[in-house]
Image (tube, rainbow, N blue to C red):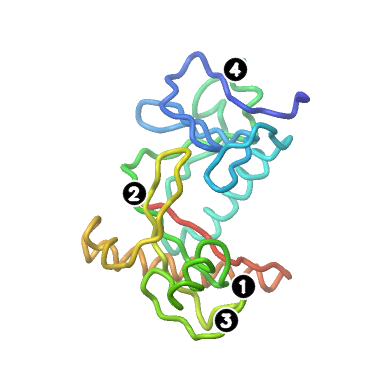
Amino acid sequence: MNESTLFNSTVPELLLLARGKVRDIYDLDDALLIVATDRISCFDVVLPTPIPDKGRVLTHLSRYWFKQTESIVRNHFLTMDLELAVGHWESLQPLKGRAMVVQKAHPLPVEAVVRGYLSGSAWKEYRQTSAVCGIPLPRGLRESDKLPGPIFTPATKAPQGQHDENIPFDRMAGIVGRDRAEAIRRISLRLFEEAAAYAAQRGLIIADTKFEFG
C-alpha cells in the first residue's frame, strides 16, 4: 500500500464506535467523525485489497450530494474542516479530505432503496416472481432494463458479512410505523428522481441507490 491508501484509520484521541464495511466512526460527544477508508465492499463482504484515495472520492461525492439535496430533506452533514471542528491533532492529518463531522442520529433499522433499472438482487427476485418487494412489474423485462418508473424497495440492515434482505413496504411499515414509512418512501423517490435527472443531463445513469434515515 502507498501513502495515499488507508485501510483502517487510527485516531487515538477519540473513541472508535464502529468499523463498517467502508467507513470508521468515532465519537465526538455531540457529533460523530465519519472516516471513509479505501476498503472495498462487494456483495456485503470486505475485500482485502483497497483502492488508493477511494475514501476521498466517496467523501467529496457525499458532501456534494448532501449540499445538492438539502432543500429536499435535512441531512446530518456538518463540516469537513477537521481542524475547526475537532482539533489540530497529528492523527487527523491522514484523514483530511476523507472524513466529515456529522450530527448524531438514531438510524432506523431499514434501508431505503430506490431502483430505476432492473439489476442486482431486484433482477434475481423479478425472475422468480415478476415482482420486486411485492411491486408487480411488466413481464418480459431483461436484466438492466430501465423500469417504467422508479420503485421503492426497502431492505433490512444485515450485520456485517450477511446479506441485506429486500422486504415489502408493509413489512417496513410494521418496523418503523406507517406514517414514517410513507414519508421515507416519498422523500426517497423525490431524491432519486431529482438526482437521476441531474446526472442524466451530464451523461450519467443512476441505476439505483440507497438512503438511510434517522
Q: Of the residues tagged 4 and 1, which is closer to the observer?
A: 1
Asked if marks 1 and 3 touch (Cβ < 8 Å), the reply is no
Amino acid type at image mark 1: Glu
Q: Residues within 10 Å of mark 2 (few under 14, many from 20)?
A: few
* Farthest right residue in view: 2
Q: Residue at x 72, y 69 (%)?
A: 202
Residue holding disc 3: 141
Q: Residue at x 39, y 66 (%)?
A: 187
Amino acid type at image mark 2: Gly
Measured in 3D between alpha carbons, the distance from the residue under mark 2 to the one under mark 3, in whole angstroms, is 35 Å
Residue holding disc 1: 143
Q: Which numbered disc, 2 or 3, marks the residue that appears first in the sequence?
A: 3
Residue holding disc 4: 91
Tell me the SS state at disc 3: loop
Relative image position of residue 30 (x, y in whole percent): 35, 30
Amino acid type at image mark 3: Leu
Q: Which numbered disc, 4 or 3, marks the residue that appears first in the sequence?
A: 4
Specify whether 147 is left or right of 154.
right
Tell me the SS state at disc 1: loop
